Image: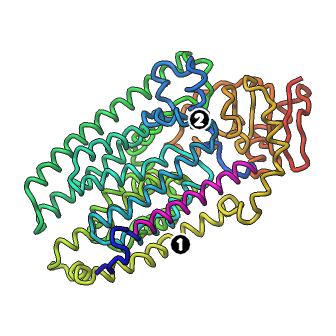
Amino acid sequence: MERRNAHPGIDLYLVSAIILAVVFASFWITSTNYVYGTFNDGYSDMGQLPSSLFMHLYYPYLTQGLQYLAFGTHISFFALLLIPGFALWSSPMYVVALQDIFVALAGIMAYVICRDILKSRPFGLIMAILFFLNAGIMGAVNFNVHLEGFLPFFYLLSFYFYMKGRMRWFIVSIALLLSIMETMPFIAGTLIAGLLFYEYLHYVKSPSFDKKVHRRRMMALGIAIILVIAFELFYIWAVRTLLYDYSAGMYGSLPPDARVIDFVTPQIGALLNPSNIGKDQALFYYALAGAAMLFLSFGITSLVDPVLTAILLGLWLTEVFFLDNWGFALPTFQYYLYVTGSALVASVLGISILQERRKRRNRIAGFLSRNLNYVRAAALPIGIIASAIPFLYLYASMHGTMFGFIYHGSGTLSSYTGIDNALASIPYNATVMAQSVIYPHFEHNMQLELSPVVHQIVFTSKGYAAVNYTFYWFKPQYIAIYRNSSTYDEEMNSSSFNVYSYMGDNYSVYYNSTDGFEIFKMK
């Protein structure tokens, strides 16, 4: 039973959720700004989306035809909405801030869902806290920026509108979810499948069943299915058309990281080949920890119907247990953004099922139904414990980037003024090769290349994920490296590629600092 609000008209729990969201977004924006400004170790992904936005604004001849929908290596309608804001703030930090704000809004949606659907403000605040403390969420927003960052908000918004019976807004929200990128039909598809399962195995048997509501929901889900199929067919056609155009020599001046990659077809092919499935034993233990976090990260109620939860988490379970995808298993990538919202929805539906059917033959379910207040209260410690192992791995791998600005203070940024000025002095139309930690600082440069080994490292670590990545190599006028970075040996000083052997006597020192930054210019 909820306590009476001491301030009628003011939802203090909502205010608390908003404060948590502001703290969450502020922390991660500040953390990323520190990492970005100090050239800390990370991936070049932070530069891809800003580079594409810059290209759409100032190099329209590179974005003709279907390429106009290409952002980074993905097809996206939603990214077009980011262009006006980028025109006002042309920096990678614009996209970082926007991503983290949308993730924070998803945490507020967690509260609103529990308040309006489960009629419990305290539990809604608990779910918002668990969302913000989830290791998968923290790992996703740590230093990198991806289109997936906009996924959780629209996923939870779609679920909210569906459960509240606002079917027109549900369709709009599903369309926005599908517009984010070419993998979204699979996410929307698992949500729709889970809602269909819930409707026919639970809602139609509940005391509150309403035939009119059920009919409206079925019509909305039917429209949503049509949208999923339409978007997926378009994405398949667009990706294949662009890949053909690249191979035919079109878009010859297009930077390599602005070229679309087919992420879907190789994985479907792997699923159709049983010999490739579930062979990585080392991954299995990480997968178990990730599955435990997802099934229990919002309490135990996702286990009320484990089949329903498995449907909602279907994409993640397939990627990890069948396709041996380390990216999905580890919390240091963005891929938990795909399913953290699904885990929350599974827990909410579990409680909804228990609320609707208090008398059950199943003893465990009956016990949970009669003790819902305790079940809700236990969600916080259970969720924190379930997320503990992935968080410890995340902290051990990335604590320097997660909390670096706390350890060292923001004043550290001023010591990098020299390298910032040196990078800014390189002409915007020069050809540049840059190490991945420096890459995001060249979002304005359309002739930028990473080390030749980077794409091999990222895309061919697994046989099923091997990608025919179309790129060109120019002789760069400038080469920027950071020898003190942990990525230096892998990218610039390996048996596959040695930057000094590559340069020979053709380059001279343009900038050199005592802490390992070097810029070379072609003679």
> Helix, strand or loop at disc 1?
helix
- Magenta portion: prevailing SS class: helix
Q: Is residue 367 left or right of residue 432?
A: left
Residue appearing at x 77%, y 50% in the figure: 485
Would residue 227 be counted in the magenta stretch? no
Q: Nearer the viewer, residue 132 or 345?
A: 132
Report the number of discs: 2
Above or below — where is 412 with respect to 378? Answer: above
Q: Residue at x 53, y 52 (%)?
A: 100
Q: Circles 2 and 1: CB distance less than 8 Å?
A: no
The answer to which quarter of the image holds residue 380 is: bottom left
Q: Which residues are magenta?
A: 13-38
Quadrant where the image shows the C terminus: top right
Dividing the picture into quadrants, the one containing residue 376 is bottom left
Which quadrant holds the N terminus? bottom left
Which residue in the structure is indicated by mark 2? 88
Amino acid under disc 1: Ala
Residue 453, image x and y in percent? 69, 38
Q: Secondary structure at mark 2?
A: helix
Q: Quadrant of residue 199?
A: bottom left
Amino acid at circle 2: Leu
Picture disc at residue 388 = 1
Would you say 426 lies left or right of 63 here? right
Sequence-wise, the earlier of marks 2 and 1 is: 2
**Within the magenta stretch, is there residue 14?**
yes
Residue at 56 percent across and 20 percent down: it is 60
- Callout in the foreground (2, 1): 2
Where does residue 336 sit, x and y in percent of width and height? 47, 56
Q: For the point 57% across and 46% down, which residue is it?
A: 145
